[in-house]
Image (cartoon, rainbow, N blue to C red):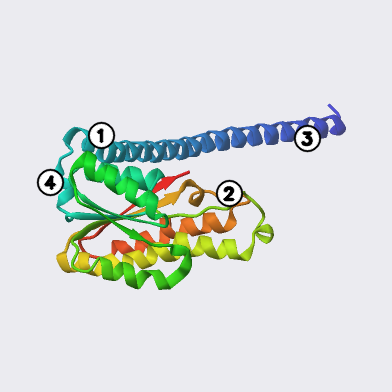
Amino acid sequence: MSAYNFNIAKLGNIVQGTIVSLAKEVVQSYDNNLDILAIVGACYTVRKGLHLLSGCCSLIKHQVFPLLFSNTNTILKYGEWAVVTGGSDGIGKAYAEELARLGVNIILLGRSIQKLQNVSEAIAATYGVKTRIIVADFNKGPEVFPSIKEALVDVDVGILVNNAGMFFDYPACLTEVPEEKSLEIINVNIAAAVMMVYVVLPGMLQRKRGAIINVSSITSWKPVPLMTVYAASKVNLMLHLKQKLIFSSNVSPRLLCCL
């Protein structure tokens, strides 16, 4: 065998050995990556499983148990009266009717005295509870709250339902929404909810019991186009106001998100 052929054969052996070595490293690396991906997948599955289990437990606790074991004493432990803003129709009216069914006296707040009177009389006649109405236009700003505070002096308010809300006339870009409409949304959706907490929370803390329900919106969970100010106002209810209330002793803040 000539020296040339020997070098060619030797070079071939070297190349072959290098390829085999690289192939082994690739296979080993692939196996290691599979192990890593399997661990990541298992952790993700466990995390999702725990999240699903937590959601199921929450569903059972807040939706099933109240239906099976609901009783008047559970609600009345907060107090004899419930204040419902925006209570003349929609979600607010439904809250008022359900609380009245459980034996809680109802105070309705809204702009239309005729609607308030109709709902108040219907609730009193149907459920046999005491009812009151307070006419208040939250869009007017701070001037409406002194009269509300005066009307609720010495009232055992155990539950506040912050339901009053305002929406755009139609979805639009921020620059196309009149400034007055944005201010109305801020006044009704944010300022009114915060100020109503100022009105009832001192009494709740003094009595060491109470519950505050803030009705928010699904638009507070995900960015929604053409609803900038409205969605931002509902995020305030979902995050900031609820978190602040958690630190108030013996007062239970709750959040309801609707469309």
Name the residue at 47% across, 55% down: 234
Q: Give the labeled residue for mark 1.
A: 64
| Quadrant in the picture for residue 195 | bottom left
Q: Amino acid at mark 4?
A: Asn
Numbered label attached to residue 139: none
| Quadrant in the picture for residue 107 | bottom left
The 10 Å Cα crowd at callout 1, few under 14, some 14 to 19, many 20 or more, is few
Q: CA distance from mark 3 to mark 1?
A: 77 Å
Numbered label attached to residue 73: 4
Task: Please tell me which of labels 2 and 4 falls first in the chain.
Answer: 4
| Quadrant in the picture for residue 229 | bottom right
Which of the two marks, 3 or 1, is nearer to us in this view? Answer: 1
Q: Give the labeled residue for mark 2.
A: 224
Query: Quick one: which residue is furthest to the top in this view?
Result: 1
Q: Which SS class for mark 4?
A: helix
Which of the two marks, 2 or 4, is nearer to us in this view? Answer: 4
Task: Please tell me which of labels 2 and 3 falls first in the chain.
Answer: 3
Q: Is residue 165 left or right of residue 6?
A: left
